[in-house]
Image: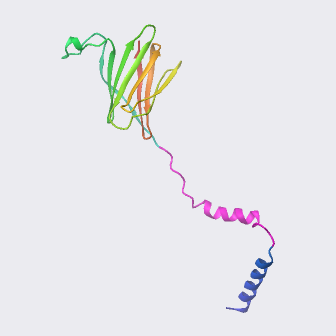
Amino acid sequence: MSKNNDLEIDRITRLMQTDKSFDAPSDAIQWSKNIFLSRAVEPKKSIVERVLAVLQMDLSPNRAAFGERSASASPARQMLFQAGENDLDLRIKQEENSLSVRGQILGEGFADCLVVISNENASFETRANELSEFKFADIPGGKYALSFRNREKEIVVEDIGIE
């Protein structure tokens, strides 16, 4: 090594040996942190796939579908929707002064999911059980949107007429 390098190393060693400070200067700490800041991995944003449910069948109360026996007619309106890999069985029944809405999400991934039925005036929430069944009681009549959400997917049923 050259004599200049040896002198510089001796000077730095003496500075380190005589240094009485408890911490590095704040500007040196910030400079060190900034070195690694640009290399940090940014977390990916969560992307939830939104699937619009399509009505497949709408059975009115007390009216059997073509090809069904009349004894199987139900006092509830039954609606069947298809949403990608999932299907939705929805039943709306008239109670005393309100309606009850119950149903089941058929297919994988929606057990214990959040279920929301809402319109511009009201919003109701519940959670589906382990069989992906859900129920709402005391819903006033009107047009509603119904949504089911898990970590990867949201199923949306728009404009359900609950009369």
144 horizontally vs 107: left or right: right
Give yes or no for residue 38 being in the magenta stretch: yes
Q: Quadrant of residue 144?
A: top left
119 horizontally vs 69: left or right: right
Identify the residue at image location x=26%, y=11%: 63
Q: Quadrant where the C terminus lies?
A: top left
Q: Quadrant where the N terminus lies?
A: bottom right
70 horizontally vs 127: left or right: left
Q: Quadrant of residue 15?
A: bottom right
Query: 80 or 100: which is nearer to us?
Result: 100
Residue 47 at what x, y percent from top left? 46, 43
Extreme-front residue of the structure: 130
Residue 137 at what x, y percent from top left? 45, 17
State whether residue 53 is above or below residue 119: below
Identify the residue at image location x=42%, y=13%: 99
Identify the residue at image location x=40%, y=30%: 129
Q: Which residues are magenta?
A: 20-46
